Amino acid sequence: MRFQISFRFIVLVNLLLVLVASSKAQSTWSLAGNAAAVGGNCFQLTPNSNHKRGAAWSQNQVNLKKPFDLYFRLNFGNNNNGADGIAVVLQKSSAGLNALGNEGYEIGYGSITPSLDIEFDTYENVWPAYDIFDDHCAINGDGLTAWELASAVPLLGSSINVEDNLYHIVQVNWQPSSTTLKVYFDCNLVQTLAYDLVNNIFSGDSMVYYGLTSGTGSADNAQYFCELYLNAGIDSAFCPGVPVTLDGHTNFSTYSWSPAQGLSCTNCLHPVADPNDSTTYVFTASYGCLTATDTMHLGTNCMVLPIELISFTAFCEKNSTNLKWSTAAEYNNDYFVIERSGDAVNYQMLGTIDGAGNSSAGHNYSFLDEQPLPGTNYYRLKQVDFDGTSTYSNVQSALCTSLLGLFVYPNPSHDVTHLQIQSAVVTTIMYMVTNLAGTIILQQEIKLTEGSNEILLDNHRMAAGIYDVAIISHDKVLHTLLVIQ
């Protein structure tokens, strides 16, 4: 992406702190047991077989000293006499990302310790006597189904079956100031637990793993979960007149930014922001009944120095990033250091270019990054004086690698399904819809534009059931499951 800007060379004290707010970025997952990825940020925890167990752990830990929300979609299968359920688990087991508990009524979390276990039970076992009713939720401690920290409550009301082959939205909210954990099921509050998790469960350790587990016994179900994520990006410093790009990430169905002041658009993921003063932007996203928010703060922090930088741009040329900048005047300018980051926090030097020293004339500079990192790359200039004094430019970003993203909504779907495809470049892909028998139902080659592309599927051409949706490019294949009712 390219920005044309005109400004004096500026010191930007970057307030680039990793957000630990009430939202969460997309995770990378480690799988154990019978768990398997099925595409589209979705995973099967157990197959439709007896005596299976699976676990999926996020490689991003959460800090129990900070507030957070976890969002998931859970599918408990289609057999009302099946078993056994899914649990959302916080744990600090010595097994770490390889932790896997007992099968059956212990739902894959049994014996994982220390842990906090939010159990969504779908089968009432005759033994042990303390197994909770089916279609109920309880909160347990240390992988012990008998240690109930919060007693079982119905998930959807009395005698309503959750094994309906639908994806149900689950939200887990933690507030450390009140040591309160809340659990929402299809946007209804079903559990509230006021408990000192850090000290009573994790012996003072606030950094814990989170994930999901599942198990089957003599009865079974295919049980799935999908991750929902929302992140407005990192807080930054800026100077008015020097636009910056907001870096939103979400797989919710709809999203928007507010206030609109200083934004190039309010309904895109990466608007350009140029407010007149410090501003906190709210990123609001919705999926089904769920609406969530995250915030990103732009704080003014700059001072004018005696070098006039009239432009600094980063734009793509094929799979490379071309950096160009121009100065109107230079004073004691020894050289520039070009720095790059993949997360806008940790920067590394790419190279150096000599400055003009002392000059009242304009100068143009350029630098080509021929091997940018996967995903969004962040660039800044470090200007170094002859006496060793250094200052930084504003940050520019570019997305030049051939990345694809696939999101299907609503899911489950009735009449029309939306395929939202994100592409970093203009490219041609094939999209394909197949049934579980492998029969191709729909297949078409389309040309993608840079950014967000949307395709509408007429569900009347397909019978009710589960379908695999795939997009195929020259270097990548992405899959996700679609349920049509």
Image (cartoon, rainbow, N blue to C red):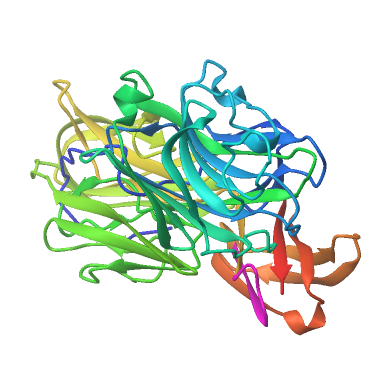
What residue is shown at x 67% (from left), y 59% (from top)? 163
Magenta segment boundaries in residue numbering: 410-421
* 418 in magenta: yes
Q: Is residue 371 visible?
A: no
The quadrant in which the N terminus is found is bottom left
Compare residues 345 and 197 and report the one nearer the observer: 197
- Image position, residue 19 (x, y; %): 31, 41
* 316 in magenta: no
Q: Is residue 412 visible?
A: yes
What residue is shown at x 33% (from left), y 24% (from top)? 200
Which residue ends up furthest to the top in the rendered image?
94
- Image position, residue 236 (x, y; %): 24, 46
Is 15 located above or below residue 95 in the figure?
below
Compare residues 361 and 374 and report the one nearer the observer: 374
Left/right of residue 428 with respect to residue 280 in the rendered view: right
Compare residues 439 and 121 and report the one nearer the observer: 121
Is 234 located above or below residue 55 in the figure?
below
- Image position, residue 239 (x, y; %): 15, 52
- Image position, residue 335 (x, y; %): 27, 30
